[in-house]
Image (tube, rainbow, N blue to C red):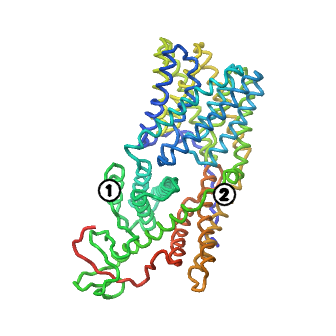
């Protein structure tokens, strides 16, 4: 049974100024920025050369898929990008067919709201990641209000599919140069976060924030490393050991060396050899953290008082040496546990969609109401209000409010930027395409600092796209965008408050309890000499499935807003304990030697790892 008490509810003031505070840019901000430019430019320039720039909105729908999956290993990225492109094409097809069959604005808003709900739920269930459903909703909602005929639909879909295929190639282009780039970046972020926490381990608000950030970074690193379910390569195993070292630093920050963690992070970010921390899978030879080699089972070692021992040549192993070697053994155990978790098949998509029903209802209601209100106010493009509402829903009500503030401020500044850029964009087709490319780059380069700053470029981008079929009065576009932004933000936030999902927190608590029970059962079976292989295997599989379910449940809850904070630290600690128990079950089956509890060592001075 879980011994942890439920996390108490938090009542927070909704921030305004704090929501606009700029953060540090992402370490790889230039990757999505350059990718989207590389994906958008060739199709747009080709259409401009052919004199059909009016078709660019369809190719841009496919090109924007290049924004996805930059944090995924390339083997997983290939699949995720393909699914995103197929999802984009599916939503675009529904929108284009609907637009070709009816011009009733109420019907079209309803279709757009339903599509937004489906896109939100599927993206949350599959954990696609930023920009998640927002781009897909923008593409499908905008297409609903573009005049179509049934005969034009196949050709427009073909353009989007061709641009999507090009975006896939752009997203996969770095793979030959840095095949493990995403895993390296995630591992480096976990090491740096652990080092930051170790430096602020004395407590206080700063230490608490650093601890939370470190556990989140470690969790994200595991998500990246476990995204590929096939047999891990030597490089990925080495990165897994480094992530475990970050976990060890979180467990004992006073004993951690922040300088060493940061040096490992710097080495991992490059293309050189991954630093060795010791291979816990080798029982006889293991590199000691201080540069010496510890050989287990040495005949000449002898006890030398409590907490230490001495070897034949007089070298003394103190508490720190033994503890650090114990870290190597725990590291090996967790690697075995991670391998056992990787072997468990992921849950079916339909089972992950069930708990997200409130999310879908909220998205459908908020988007539909925003669109209807926009129509009632006489808007020609109600999809702007619809997309604004769809973009608000975050992990909790405070973040949802912050996103609303950021969206409004960013759009208001963005329409001013559009008013300044519009005369330049209207100098000719090439000027229009170049302005669109500049806005694409600026949006992705700045959005990591704060969402409102990225929206300053997203807003003129969306307005410039409406210029592709033909120019419209600037004042009309600016007024419509401001009204729809205010309507979408207000109605969307009201829907977020009205439709809640309080079960998300209870599901995480139940998943934690399930893991605790499965771990206790597996430990009992592993410790029982009379356990049959069948019982041991059943316990192992049950625990591995519970750990996988815990991660999926925690990720789903992170996409829901609720007053209690997500127990991220408890989730990571439960996973660590479960991994070690999984290793014990594997060892009990004879697949891994038992490390014992009274090991002796031979300490070899000056040996290199």
Q: Position of residue 464 (x, y in %)?
A: 54, 21
Q: Quadrant of the C terminus?
A: bottom left
Corner quadrant of residue 123: top right
Residue behind mark 2? 505
Q: Quadrant of residue 53?
A: top right
Circle 2: is it few (<14), some (14-19), or many (20+) Cα within 10 Å? many
Residue 442 shows up from this direction: no
Q: Is residue 454 visible?
A: yes
Image quarter (top left, top right, bottom left or bottom right) of the N terminus: bottom right
Along the horizontal axis of the image, is 465 left or right of 122?
Answer: left
Point out the residue furthest to the top here.
Answer: 427
- Label 1, residues with CA under 10 Å away: few <14, some 14-19, many ≥20: some
Dots 1, 2 in contact, CB < 8 A: no
Q: Secondary structure at mark 2?
A: helix
Task: Report which residue position mark 1 lands on.
Answer: 263
Q: Earlier in the sequence, mark 1 or mark 2?
A: 1
Towards the viewer: 257 or 324: 324
Q: Residue at x 31, y 76 (%)?
A: 294
Residue at left 37%, top 74%? 325
* Image location of residue 555, percent across then percent down: 60, 53
Image height of 445 relative to 178, above or below: above
Residue 176's spot in the image, x, y percent?
A: 39, 43
Give the CA distance from mark 1 to mark 2: 38 Å
Q: Is residue 213 left or right of residue 323?
A: right
Look at the picture and state if 134 lies above or below 264.
Answer: above
Q: Is residue 398 above or below residue 97?
A: below
Q: Which mark is residue 213?
A: none
Is label 1 in a helix, a strand or a loop? helix
Where residue 419 appears, as percent x and y from the top left, is 52, 18
């Amino acid at each position: 049974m879980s011994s942890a008490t439920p996390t108490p509810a938090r009542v927070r003031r909704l921030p305004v100024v704090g929501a606009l505070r700029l953060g540090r840019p992402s370490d790889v901000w230039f990757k999505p920025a350059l990718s989207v430019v590389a994906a958008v430019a060739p199709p747009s320039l080709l259409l401009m050369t052919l004199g059909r720039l009016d078709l660019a909105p369809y190719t841009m729908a496919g090109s924007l898929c290049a924004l996805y999956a930059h944090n995924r290993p390339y083997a997983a990225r290939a699949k995720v990008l393909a699914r995103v492109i197929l999802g984009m094409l599916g939503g675009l097809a529904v929108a284009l067919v609907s637009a070709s069959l009816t011009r009733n604005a109420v019907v079209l808003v309803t279709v757009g709201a339903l599509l937004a709900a489906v896109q939100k739920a599927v993206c949350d269930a599959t954990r696609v990641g930023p920009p998640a459903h927002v781009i897909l909703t923008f593409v499908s909602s905008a297409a609903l209000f573009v005049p179509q005929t049934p005969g034009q639909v196949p050709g427009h879909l073909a353009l989007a599919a061709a641009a999507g295929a090009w975006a896939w190639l752009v997203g996969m282009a770095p793979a030959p140069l840095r095949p493990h780039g995403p895993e390296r970046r995630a591992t480096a972020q976990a090491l740096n976060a652990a080092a930051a926490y170790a430096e602020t381990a004395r407590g206080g608000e700063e230490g608490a924030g650093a601890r939370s950030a470190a556990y989140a970074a470690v969790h994200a690193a595991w998500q990246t490393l476990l995204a590929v379910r096939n047999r891990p390569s030597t490089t990925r195993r080495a990165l897994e050991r480094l992530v475990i070292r970050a976990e060890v630093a979180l467990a004992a920050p006073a004993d951690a060396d922040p300088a060493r963690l940061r040096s490992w992070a710097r080495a991992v970010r490059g293309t050189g050899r991954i630093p060795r921390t010791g291979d816990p899978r080798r029982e006889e030879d293991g590199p000691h953290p201080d540069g010496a080699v510890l050989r287990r089972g040495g005949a000449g070692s002898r006890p030398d008082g409590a907490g230490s021992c001495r070897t034949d040549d007089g070298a003394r192993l103190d508490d720190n040496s033994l503890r650090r070697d114990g870290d190597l053994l725990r590291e090996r155990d967790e690697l075995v546990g991670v391998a056992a978790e990787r072997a468990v098949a992921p849950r079916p998509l339909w089972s992950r969609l069930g708990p997200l029903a409130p999310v879908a209802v909220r998205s459908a209601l908020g988007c539909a109401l925003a669109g209807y209100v926009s129509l009632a106010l006489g808007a020609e493009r109600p999809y702007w209000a619809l997309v604004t509402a769809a973009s608000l829903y975050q992990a909790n009500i405070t973040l949802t409010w912050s996103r609303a503030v950021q969206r409004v401020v960013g759009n208001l500044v963005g329409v001013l930027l559009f008013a300044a850029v519009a005369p330049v964009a209207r100098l000719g087709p090439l000027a229009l395409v170049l302005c669109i490319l500049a806005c694409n780059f600026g949006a992705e380069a700045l959005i990591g600092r704060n969402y409102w700053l990225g929206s300053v470029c997203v807003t003129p981008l969306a307005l410039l796209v409406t210029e592709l079929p033909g120019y419209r009065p600037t004042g009309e576009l600016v007024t419509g965008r401001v009204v729809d932004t205010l309507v979408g933000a207000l109605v969307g936030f009201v829907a977020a408050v009205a439709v809640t999902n309080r079960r998300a927190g209870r599901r995480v608590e139940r998943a934690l309890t399930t893991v605790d029970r499965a771990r206790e059962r597996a430990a009992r079976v592993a410790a029982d000499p009379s356990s049959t292989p069948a019982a041991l295997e059943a316990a192992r599989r049950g625990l591995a499935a519970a750990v996988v379910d815990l991660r999926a449940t925690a990720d789903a809850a992170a996409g829901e807003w609720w007053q209690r904070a997500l127990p991220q630290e408890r989730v990571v600690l439960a996973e660590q304990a479960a991994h070690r128990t999984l290793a014990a079950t594997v060892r009990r089956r004879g697949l891994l030697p038992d490390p014992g509890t009274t090991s002796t060592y031979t300490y070899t001075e000056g040996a290199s790892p």
